[in-house]
């Protein structure tokens, strides 16, 4: 009983201690403005600190609280609550992610099922996989240049989908190759049709691997959003970050980073919960 | 009655790093319809190899098999297979696992009729209360019951069992031997069972095929098991004939399995047949008389 309570305490207390220590370190290295009396008697504001232009936690809160306190407010196009910006980003990420799964899962199946297909395309995939979203984006713009008003949107979706697809492709392929021969023998002995073998045996057997891929893909899709919004000027949290940087409002950068991190963390937790449910069902 | 299964000059060669290995050579066997035949032999002699060729999961290097007047090519649901571990699909309930095959074989029947077939066999093997559980929720023995129900539910022409009780503890093994025997008594499916256990072979079979050691293993001797059916374990164990046959089997495995191949006894590998099931059965029955029939 006593021990149990201590464990629960630890689980809460220790991360809190970590947060406080990090805030302290942040405060220490951040820059601040001090009043300095000049030799001629006038007062002048001088920057000081280890990283002079890095706003500290207190300053960040003071300057950005309006985005947090009213997270869904829409004052102007470029002045909205932080969660409202996040929401815009999440919507496009969801779309791009959906495309990634719809393309990546069948591609993974083909790679896993056919040795020849795998020999043909695996090298290409290995080459394309490490390419940064910053490199894909311009290509997306070129490809969809003639799509009129939705060109930017399509280019963004393209970039998210292409970058996020690979973990799904590779994990699905591994999962298909790992289907136990015994399960396939059941299909052979019972003479199941191809469709039935696929849906009754192969897909369920691959599901845990597919979900690992889905979780990793979601992480990447979210990672890509900032780059995509910076380059397309599409409204969202990444775009907000970029605008504020250009306007010299560095406190907002910190706010955006924390928000992006937190959202990414929550998405990952949600996916791993889902993943665990699927794995325990098997 | 004429032969229902004809295995003629079956050979299997495996490619190995040291060159081709002829595991089984000129294996000949005829099985009558409704006969229960066991295949016994030392570990690694090629019993599973023969069985998986019969199942169509592996190709013969030469020779052929005729089942019910037709040459066998490839696997099919006309043979119900039970392996040592039942390989149930873990995402399906016991019922769904059985239904997968029933749906294939009885596709002309209505859904309700098919469900009833699956349910019937699951109830007969004693899973009436557990048929909607998934394999993970079932004990090892219960899973093998599902495996048996699945094989019988196909109403196959032939039943192929590869050490179906090999992974079970002896109490469960006795229980499941009884379940298998009861089911078999209802359908009298032609069956070929691989086993290591001489008592299991004597209890279940009409004939016991003793295989010589490998490589190039073949049929060594054949033992007719004359006990009337339905059999009861207790009566068998009180029959002196039982011990005579048992002795004959062990004698073969300990000596002639080797000498027929020009080997010296004792150079075999893996667990031998010197089982101590007899003493176990006796102590078990002293504690609780077997009253099942
Ligand atoms: N795919 C394979 N490639 C090469 N050799 C094989 C292969 N499968 C089996 N063998 C060899 O064939 C021989 C017979 O194997 P098999 O599994 O049929 O024996 P078994 O009689 O069923 O043995 P056990 O009683 O242990 O199950 C063994 O020596 C084994 O090493
Ligand atoms: Mg074997």
Image (tube, coloured by chain):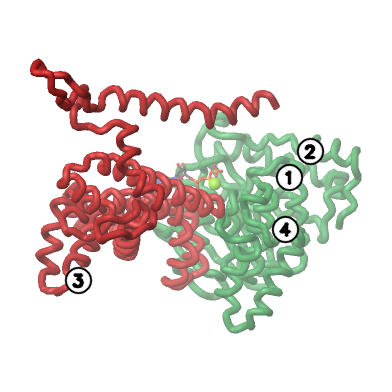
Chain colours: A red, B green
Label placed on residue A150 = 3
Instruction: Report if the CB atoms under discs 2 and 1 are less than 8 Å apart.
Output: yes
Task: Report in which chain the residue with disc 4 lies.
Answer: B
Sooner in the amino-acid sequence: mark 2 or mark 1: 1
* Residue extending furthest toward the front: A41
Q: Nearer the viewer, mark 2 or mark 4?
A: 4
| Mark 1 surroundings within 10 Å by alpha-carbon count, few (fewer than 14), some (14 through 19), many (20 or more) | many
Q: Secondary structure at mark 1?
A: helix
Q: Secondary structure at mark 2?
A: helix
| Residue under the image location 62 percent in, 39 percent down | B253
Q: Nearest the camera: A54 or A10? A: A54
Q: Secondary structure at mark 4?
A: loop
Residue pointed to by mark 2: B278
Q: CA distance from mark 1 to mark 4?
A: 30 Å
Q: Secondary structure at mark 3?
A: helix
Residue pointed to by mark 4: B130
Percent of width and height locating residue B266: 57, 29
Q: CA distance from mark 2 to mark 1?
A: 8 Å
């Amino acid at each position: 009983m006593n021990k149990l309570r201590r464990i629960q305490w630890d689980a809460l207390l220790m991360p809190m201690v970590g947060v406080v220590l990090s805030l302290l370190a942040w405060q220490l290295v951040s820059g601040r403005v001090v009043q300095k009396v000049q030799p001629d008697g006038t007062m002048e504001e001088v920057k000081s600190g280890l990283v002079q232009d890095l706003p500290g936690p207190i300053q960040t809160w003071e300057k950005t609280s309006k985005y947090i306190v009213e997270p869904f407010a829409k004052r102007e196009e470029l002045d909205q609550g932080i969660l409202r910006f996040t929401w815009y980003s999440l919507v496009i990420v969801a779309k791009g992610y959906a495309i990634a799964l719809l393309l990546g899962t069948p591609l993974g199946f083909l790679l896993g099922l056919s040795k020849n297909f795998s020999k043909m395309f695996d090298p290409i995939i290995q080459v394309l996989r490490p390419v940064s979203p910053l490199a894909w984006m311009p290509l997306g713009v070129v490809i969809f240049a003639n799509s009129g008003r939705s060109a930017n949107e399509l280019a963004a979706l393209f970039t998210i989908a292409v970058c996020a697809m690979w973990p799904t492709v590779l994990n699905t392929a591994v999962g298909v190759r790992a289907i136990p021969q015994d399960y396939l023998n059941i299909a052979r002995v019972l003479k199941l049709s191809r469709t039935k073998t696929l849906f009754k045996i192969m897909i369920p057997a691959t599901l845990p691997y597919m979900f690992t891929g889905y979780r990793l893909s979601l992480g990447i899709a979210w990672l890509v959003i900032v780059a995509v919004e910076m380059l397309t000027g599409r409204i969202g949290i990444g775009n907000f970050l970029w605008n504020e940087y250009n306007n010299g409002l560095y406190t907002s950068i910190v706010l955006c980073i924390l928000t992006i991190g937190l959202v990414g963390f929550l998405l990952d937790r949600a996916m791993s919960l889902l993943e665990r449910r699927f794995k325990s069902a098997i | 009655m004429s032969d229902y299964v004809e295995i003629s000059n079956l050979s299997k060669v495996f490619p190995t790093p040291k060159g081709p290995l002829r595991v089984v050579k000129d294996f000949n066997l005829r099985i009558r319809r409704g006969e229960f035949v066991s295949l016994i032999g030392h570990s690694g002699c090629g019993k599973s190899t023969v069985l998986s060729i019969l199942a169509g999961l592996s190709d013969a290097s030469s020779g052929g098999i005729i089942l019910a007047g037709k040459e066998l090519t490839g696997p099919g649901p006309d043979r119900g297979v039970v392996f040592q571990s039942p390989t149930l699909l873990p995402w399906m309930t016991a019922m769904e696992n059985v239904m997968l095959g029933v749906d294939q074989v009885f596709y002309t029947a209505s859904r309700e009729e098919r469900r009833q077939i699956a349910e019937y066999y699951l109830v007969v093997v004693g899973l009436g209360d557990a048929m909607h559980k998934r394999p993970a929720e079932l004990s090892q023995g219960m899973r093998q019951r599902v495996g048996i129900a699945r094989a019988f539910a196909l109403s196959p022409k032939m039943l192929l069992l590869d050490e179906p009780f090999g992974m079970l503890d002896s109490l469960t093994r006795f229980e499941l031997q009884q379940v298998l025997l009861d089911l078999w008594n209802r359908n009298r499916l032609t069956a070929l069972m691989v086993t290591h256990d001489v008592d299991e072979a004597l209890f279940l079979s009409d004939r016991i095929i003793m295989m010589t050691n490998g490589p190039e293993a073949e049929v060594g001797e054949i033992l007719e098991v004359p006990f009337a059916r339905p059999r009861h374990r207790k009566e068998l164990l009180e029959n002196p004939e039982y011990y005579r046959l048992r002795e004959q089997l062990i004698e073969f495995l300990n000596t002639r399995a080797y000498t027929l191949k020009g080997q010296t006894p004792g150079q075999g590998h893996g667990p031998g047949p010197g089982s101590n099931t007899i003493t176990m059965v006796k102590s078990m029955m002293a504690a609780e008389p077997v009253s099942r029939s």
